[in-house]
Each structure stands twice: as C-alpha cells, then as structure tokens.
Amino acid sequence: MDDNRLDNIAECAYNMDNGYVEVWYVDGNMLRIKCDEVEAALRTTEQSLAKLHKLLDNKPIEYVAMALSGEMQAYCDIEDEMAKSMFGTIVQGYLKKGYNRATAEMMAREFFRYES
C-alpha cells in the first residue's frame, strides 16, 4: 500500500446512513469504502465484527488502513482467537464457582454480548 494514501488524508468518517467510510484527501479527492462489501469477504464472528464496528465509530482511519492494506482478516482472526481464549477462561471461572457447564457457558456468552 502506498503510505501516502494515509498521510494525505484531510478527514475520515463513517457514514452510518449509507454504510460507507468516506475519506477526503488534501488534494480534494475522495475515497468511499462500502463496509458491507469489505466485511462480506471476511471470516468473522460476532465478536470480531463488533470490534470492526467499534473501529468504524471511534477510529475510522484504522478501519481504512486495514482495508487498504489487506490486513483486516488478520485483525479479525486475532480478535476471534483472543475472544475464544477469554471465553474458555470465563467458563472455567464460573465452573470453579460451582456453576454447571451450561450455565457457565451462557453467562460467558452474556459477558461477550455486553462487552463488545
């Protein structure tokens, strides 16, 4: 990726009305990235998709950087691996407290629902 594509950005914002990240460059050019199309090509889980959407809301430039560099799948894979590891740790914690497996897994899923 050409590093100048990020260095020359004047403004970057997610437009939730049309589902695009809109990037305006200092030279007057504009780039629109359709988020649904980018994300449709990825292997994601609910957790990694929630992290991508959090980026869109809070740090759209990071979303753009990953989309342009082709690193978005690696980001999703890492997020999903971390969530999987955390899920197991949370379940084990509930099991140690005396909950049965079904309840422990349900409570861990609830944690991720509100954490994302």
Image: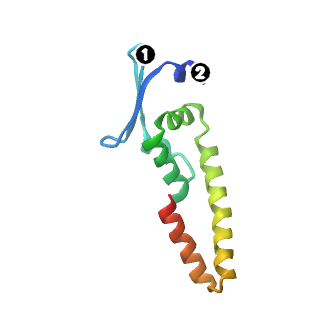
| Helix, strand or loop status at disc 2 | loop
Q: Earlier in the sequence, mark 2 or mark 1?
A: 2
Direction left: furthest residue: 17
Q: Is residue 45 visible?
A: no
**Residue 57 in the image: x percent, y percent?**
42, 43
Q: Choose top left, top right, bottom left or bottom right for residue 47.
A: bottom right
Q: What distance separates the C-alpha of mark 2 from that of mark 1?
A: 14 Å
Q: Position of residue 67 (x, y in %)?
A: 53, 35
Three-letter code, disc 1: Val
Instruction: Please report contact status of discs 2 and 1: CB closer than 8 Å, yes or no.
Output: no
Disc 2 crowd rating (10 Å Cα; few below 14, some 14-19, many 20+) is few
Which quarter of the figure is the N terminus placed in?
top right
Residue 29 visible: yes
Instruction: Report the front residue among 38 and 116.
Output: 116
Q: Position of residue 56 (x, y in %)?
A: 45, 42
Image x and y of residue 59, in percent: 48, 38
Q: Which residue is mark 2?
A: 3
User: Left or right of 43: which side holds 54?
Assistant: left
Residue under label 1, please give it.
26
